[in-house]
Image (cartoon, rainbow, N blue to C red):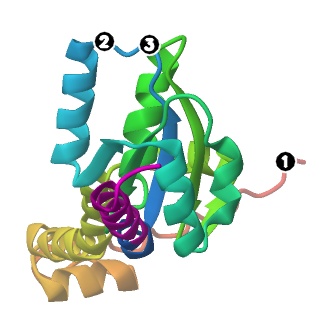
Amino acid sequence: MPSAKVLEQKKAIVAELADRLKKSVTGVLVNYKGINVADDTALRKELREAGVKYSVVKNTLLSRACEEAELTGLQTTLEGTTAIATSDEDYAAAARILSNYAKKSKTFEIKAGYLDGEVVDLATIDSLAKLPTREVLLANVLGAFQAPIASFARAIQAIVDDGGIEACLAKKAGEAPAEEAAPEAPAAEEAPAEAPAE
């Protein structure tokens, strides 16, 4: 039987894990079997730079933490080697990074995940992985905001290039501007009709 000190340490780990699960907006569990040290280091660095917490955990401790965080649907996947990646802000980062790595590895695999406190299936995790990065989404939104402004600026420049508002209004009304109006051509005289031949 473990000592009281060991039990207290395990309780502290479970409490910390449960708190992490509750505070995060998303989490992904993986089987990290077969990953080498260099790849593991690179993967951890990429996750850290994206604001994702990644750690290897014991299945028994994570199972208790899942129970405390009311994510009991994850417990059925807690076999073999397990690591968990959680994010407090970015919904897609963990899924995207881990899914990309899993595609390149024969043994590294996604086990399960959760989103806003609800356990989700692998299809949902795959959908999250396909979302663009936050920076790309922000750039798209900014582009959408700038498009009307750019169109307005081009319209104003076209008016200036066409000679000003008066010129544009005259063109729209189907008239040439006053200074460019051509003089009227004199009316052609009607030729007398020829008499019919007898």
Q: Which residue is mark 3?
A: 34
Report the predominant secondary structure element of the magenta stretch. Answer: helix
The kind of residue tagged 2 is: Asn
The mark that comes first in sequence, 1 or 2, is 2
How far apart marks 3 and 2 lie (CA) works out to 6 Å
Q: Position of residue 21 (x, y in %)?
A: 43, 66
Q: Position of residue 148 (x, y in %)?
A: 29, 75
Q: Residue furthest right?
A: 198
Marks 3/2 in contact by CB < 8 Å: the verdict is yes
Task: Residue 37: say if magenta.
Answer: no
What residue is drawn where x is 12% and y is 70%?
157
Q: Is residue 21 left or right of residue 170?
A: right
How far apart marks 3 and 1 lie (CA) works out to 110 Å
Q: Which residue is mark 2?
A: 36
How far apart marks 1 and 2 lie (CA) works out to 111 Å
Circle number at residue 14: none
Quadrant position of residue 167: bottom left
Q: Is residue 19 left or right of residue 120?
A: left
> Does 22 sit above or below residue 28?
below
Task: Residue 9: say if magenta.
Answer: yes
> Does 163 sit above or below residue 120?
below
Quadrant position of residue 44: top left
Circle number at residue 197: 1
The nearer-to-camera label among 3 and 1 is 3
The nearer-to-camera label among 1 and 2 is 2
Crowding around mark 2 (Cα neighbors within 10 Å: few <14, some 14 to 19, many 20+) is few
What residue is drawn where x is 55% and y is 69%?
190
Q: Is residue 117 visible?
A: no
The kind of residue tagged 3 is: Gly
Which span is picked out in magenta? Answer: 1-18
